[in-house]
């Protein structure tokens, strides 16, 4: 099924919610890990992050074939520009966040694993078995900066995206949120 103005394809809806909810959970867990030094959560966070990038790329491919959903109501030019900026921030962020996390972890010498399946081995420090040696401090540093900045941008974009969806549903009454839940409007 293709997207139409009245109803989005089930795959469109599924990819949107899988990527969106997973990234929101990863952002929340990432904040929790950083604020509480919850090191035990890092392997799960990294594994899910590396897996979701595959789904995000599938979503981008699907979206490029389907085009953007048609708006259900008339919007002013500033609203359209803001919506476009938010959507592009979210799309780019769904790839940037996992990639920057992989740059940070891999470049930092921590390796890359998906639930124990090793993609890139850690680089242990022979002088200190508790530590690792960076493979590339500049790559790890760039990854860290992009991950932090990207996380903040994603949070802002998600808040704006949710606010926009609620505005469409509650103020405009145009059914945009219903359509994103798979309903025909």
Image (cartoon, rainbow, N blue to C red):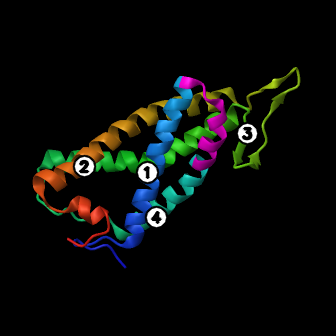
Q: Earlier in the sequence, mark 1 or mark 4?
A: 1
* Residue 112 visible in the current orientation: yes
Q: In this view, does 106 lie to the left or right of 50?
A: right
Nearest to viewer (mark 1 / mark 4): 1
Q: Mark 4 points at which residue?
A: 61
Q: Mark 3 points at which residue?
A: 111
Within-10-Å neighbours for mark 3: few <14, some 14–19, many 20+: many
Which residues fall within the magenta stretch? 36-48
Q: Distance between the residues labelled 2 and 4?
A: 20 Å
Q: Mark 1 points at which residue?
A: 21
Q: What label sits on residue 83 in the rendered view?
A: 2
Residue 137 lies in the magenta stretch: no
User: Where is the C terminus found, in terms of image quarters?
Assistant: bottom left
Q: Is residue 133 left or right of residue 68?
A: right
Q: Which residue is drawn at 73% across and 39% down?
A: 111
Q: How far apart are marks 1 and 4 (CA)?
A: 19 Å
Position of residue 126 measured from the top left corner of the image (x, y, whole percent): 88, 25
Position of residue 176 measured from the top left corner of the image (x, y, whole percent): 22, 60
Q: Residue placed farthest to the top in the image?
A: 127
User: Where is the N terminus found, in terms of image quarters?
Assistant: bottom left
């Amino acid at each position: 099924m293709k997207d139409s103005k009245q109803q989005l394809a089930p795959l469109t809806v599924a990819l949107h919610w899988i990527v969106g909810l997973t990234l929101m959970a990863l952002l929340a867990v990432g904040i929790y890990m950083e604020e509480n030094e919850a090191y035990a959560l890092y392997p799960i966070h990294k594994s899910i992050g590396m897996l979701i990038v595959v789904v995000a790329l599938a979503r981008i491919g699907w979206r490029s074939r389907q085009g953007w959903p048609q708006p259900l109501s008339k919007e002013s030019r500033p609203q359209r520009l803001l919506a476009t900026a938010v959507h592009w921030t979210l799309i780019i962020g769904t790839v940037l966040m996992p990639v920057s996390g992989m740059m940070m972890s891999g470049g930092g010498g921590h390796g890359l694993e998906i639930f124990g399946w090793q993609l890139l081995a850690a680089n242990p420090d022979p002088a200190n078995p508790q530590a690792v040696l960076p493979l590339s401090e500049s790559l790890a540093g760039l990854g860290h900066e992009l991950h932090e900045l990207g996380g903040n941008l994603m949070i802002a974009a998600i808040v704006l995206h949710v606010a926009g969806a609620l505005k469409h549903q509650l103020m405009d009454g145009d059914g945009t949120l219903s359509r994103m839940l798979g309903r025909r409007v």
